[in-house]
Each structure stands twice: as structure tokens, then as C-alpha cells.
Image (tube, rainbow, N blue to C red):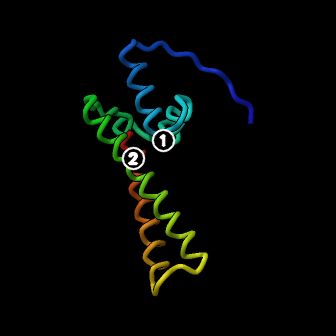
Amino acid sequence: MVTSSVRIRLSDEERNKLDIIARNLQISRSALIRQYIHAGVSNKESAKVIRWDNDTIKAICNLNMLIAKIGINVNQIARACNRGNYQGSLIHEINAMQQVLESIRKVVNQCL
């Protein structure tokens, strides 16, 4: 795939917001912009941009980080289960939790 470079001008405030969101999602600025592009804009109505204040953006980013930490804990539990350190239907419950966490992560990323 051939890529090309795009340059945009941002105010200091816009660039800071972009950096905060990207840092909290642990992705690059480019990846953040690509996520928005890949989310798709099929018509004028869906092209409207939601404007959130800084507190809302921070809360969403914080939620995303907490979800990531929960996911790490779930993976640690799953590894323990795979080693044989589990009881009953724990594996089934862990798999269900992972699916829920992934669904939440997708919703949060779509909001950004």
C-alpha cells in the first residue's frame, strides 16, 4: 500500500487535545486520525462532529485506560486457568468478560 503525507494546521489548543486523546488511547496522532477516517462518513448527517469539553474527553480516555487494565487482569486470570489453576466454569466467565470488554472498547473508540 502506498501512503502519502498530509499536513494540517492546528491551534495550540487543538494540538493539545489531539495529543491528550492519542496519549490516553496509547496510539499515535496518525492512528487516531485514521480511526476517525475508517469509522466512515457516508452522508452529511453522519459527518457532524461531536464537540466535548476537556473534562468529558478526559473521562472517556480514563474509561478507556481502565478498560485496558481490566483486560490485562482478565488475561492474567486466563493464563492461570490455562495452566490448570481454575475452578469450574471460570474459563467460560472469563471469555464472556473479554467479549464485553472488547465491545465497550469499540464503543469508546467510536465516541472519540
Q: Residue at x 48, y 72 (%)?
A: 95
Task: Give the camera-side residue of 105 and 65.
Answer: 65
| Quadrant of the frame with the C terminus | top left
Q: Position of residue 83 (x, y in %)?
A: 61, 76
Q: Which residue is mark 2?
A: 64
Q: Is residue 91 left or right of residue 84?
A: left
- Count residues near mark 1 (Cα–Cα under 10 Å), then give few for <14, some for 14-19, many for 20+: few
Q: Report, in whole angstroms, how far the alpha carbon at label 1 lies from the one at label 2.
A: 21 Å
- Count residues near mark 2 (Cα–Cα under 10 Å), then give few for <14, some for 14-19, many for 20+: many
Q: Residue furthest front?
A: 85
With respect to residue 83, does 64 lie above or below? above
Q: Position of residue 40 (x, y in %)?
A: 48, 41
Q: Residue at x 55, y 72 (%)?
A: 80
With respect to residue 89, does 93 lie above or below? above
With respect to residue 80, does 4 lie above or below? above
Indicate the amino acid at tag 2.
Asn
Q: Which residue is mark 1?
A: 40
Q: Secondary structure at mark 1?
A: loop
Q: Secondary structure at mark 2?
A: helix
Residue 110, by quadrant, is: top left
Q: Residue at x 34, y 38 (%)?
A: 45
Q: Residue furthest right?
A: 1
Q: Residue at x 74, y 31 (%)?
A: 2
Q: Earlier in the sequence, mark 1 or mark 2?
A: 1
Q: Is residue 61 left or right of residue 34?
A: left
| Quadrant of the frame with the N terminus | top right
Indicate the amino acid at tag 1.
Gly
Task: Give the camera-side residue of 5 and 66.
Answer: 66
